[in-house]
Image: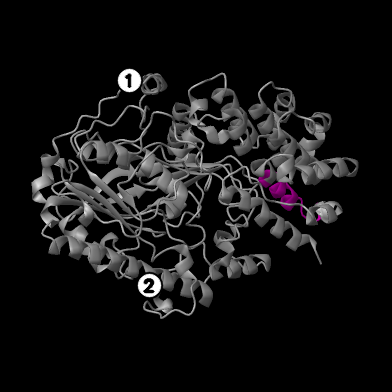
Amino acid sequence: MILMPPIRVLLLSATLLFAGVAVSTAAEPPASLPNILWLSSEDHGPHMGCYGDSYASTPHVDALASKGMLFKHAWSCGPVCAAARTTIISGLYPQALGAEHMRSQVPFPEGFKMYPQFLREAGYYCTNNSKEDYNLTQPGKVWDESSKAAHWKKRPTPKPFFAIFNSTRSHESQIRTRPHKAVHDPAKVRLPAYHPDTPEVRQDWAQYYDVVSEADADAGQHLAELASSGLAEDTIVFYWADHGSGMPRSKRWPSNSGLQVPLVVYFPEKWRHLAPAEYAPSAKSDRLVSFVDFAPTLLSLAGIQPPAWMHGHAFAGKFQTAPQPFVHGFRGRMDERTDLVRSVTDGRYVYLRNYMPHLSQAQHVSYQFQTPTTQIWWSLFTQNKTSPAQSLFWQTPKAPEELYDLQSDPDEVINLAASPSHSDILAKLRSAQRNLATQIRDTGFLPEAEVHARSGSDAPFALTQNPDRYNFNAVFEAAERASLLDPSQTPTLVLNLADRDSGVRFWAATGLLMRGRAAVEAGLDELRDALRDPSPSVQVAAAEALVRFGPATDRAPALNLLASLAVPKNSNAYVATAAWNALDAAGEAARPVLDTLKFVDPKDPKVPARASEYPARLKTDVLSRLEP
């Protein structure tokens, strides 16, 4: 099923833009444009009264929903702030932009615009107060003002305004702030099946509800300010959060718990003709929407036909489309930890495809481990004191495919992927996931270092437009073959280590690594040769496989290679991040290079500052495990 314009349409649109031919963005005259107010908040799911949560205290958003409409099935495409906001600002899936990885700061495609640029050209005064946090560099002036002082009141009248106010009150960091004056009673909180029942977990969940109430209060202040200005009936209002809760197994994980967000919209009578077709006061829409739909929807509200290169679909305005059958999510590198997961839902069932099943859901992201729930949960797991549902977060390997029925299993702990009675829905969602990856030519199937190497000075999106630079079909099929863990595919993986495409070779080495000792032994000679592969990403995967599962005689050369690649000046921060992750996964086997690792300078001044931080964090983790 086609979920977006075919690639040939995207190629044509991109060609016109690159050639300087204007794609029409004609808008209605400014006098006929609505004001648009976005109230966003951080790190919380639909834990609000209007969504049926009786434990929540969210009177202001509840009141907005009572006169407006909420969406029952709204997904953030990425389960962490930068990935989510990259989707919103661009109208593109970040995995097509090379921008799925946390704080990756890749170039935006030449000739494309971020949605505020379209709105400003249409006559809007656009303000952002104040979080940006995009994984993309900005293509020129995006906002009229983006700061903590930005406000629609500063607009030159009679300009219409588009304004965002973002509340940080509910951010993950606020869940663990101590001391804290409790409001919600920890004894009354509903714990999800995957969390252990301890005082620490109960306090974190109760405090989470407390800070969601604070975000609701922020929204109430902005709504009151709008009303007192006399503009409430001239302004379309959206309330949304940027991804699921800041609790572990929500934030950073692309299941429903990490991606479902509240989305409440209000269209005053004057602008009711621009509302979604199903809009009615107090209504609850079954339409599936996600953050990739936000930019085209804004353009549609302004009377601008969304450009063909946008992946999303307008759900309101002059150019609104029919409801879509699926919405999609993704997980790439989360701070210092690499992963590759894709997810999709039809509103009832959630499908996750784990392309790196040898990595747990709970990789050691240092920031996540500051939360008391994470710490006590890990401690109980290591003591064998967690239930099967509570242990899933930590266990490896993950199932390559996961399927959950939100109707009977809202906590997503009963995997139905192997259930014969669910084979049809599994096939449908698997096909939807594969179709989207193919349509957008998902760059996430290349290692991050490889994306940068192949892109050169171009935006990574250019790779999706040129099969000679990125043979997506070959790399994608190699990833499928590697990650499904079918042992019968081991001989093919060994052969793939000689493929001319480094992306295929990477997945061949990784596939043998994921299968363990027997597969590594089957490809020993080829993995030894891969230590000298032209691609450092292939070298890292082969070296990890040999260190962990090869003969003892292969360990020293593989460890020495990883220790060398862990130095950014010998490679770069992206390769070094992969090498440090491999050394961490090696555990005690990495001890022979401990003295070398102690003196590694993990900084890389050639990359964005945040990317340079990740090897340093990993060095700390590795040394903390190996040093006495």
Q: Which residue is located at x 52 percent, y 48 percent?
A: 103
Which amino acid type corresponds to the residue marked 1 in the rendered image? Val
The residue carrying pointer 2 sits among few (fewer than 14), some (14 to 19) or many (20 or more) residues within 10 Å by Cα, namely many
Name the residue beneath numbered marker 1.
Answer: 21
Kindly indicate the quadrant of the structure image that contains residue 275: top left
Vertical arrangement, residue 9 with respect to residue 336, above or below:
above
Gap between marks 1 and 2, in whole Å?
A: 51 Å
Answer with mark 1 or mark 2, whichever residue precedes in sequence. 1
- Where residue 582 appears, as percent x and y from the top left, is 72, 47
Which SS does the magenta portion mostly show?
Answer: helix
Which labelled disc corresponds to residue 430? none
Residue 583: in magenta span: yes
Q: Give the vertical position of 354 relative to 26 (above or below).
A: below
According to the picture, the residue beneath numbered tag 2 turns out to be: 210
Residue 172 x %, y %: 47, 63
Of all residues shown, which one is farthest toward the right? Answer: 553
**What amino acid is labelled 2 in the image?**
Asp
Please give the name of the residue rendered at 59% of the width and 48% of the height, measured from the top-left corner. Answer: 611
Camera sees residue 261: yes
The residue segment tinted magenta is 577-589
User: On the rendered image, what quadrant is the C terminus found in?
Assistant: bottom right
Q: Nearer the viewer, residue 272 or 454?
A: 454
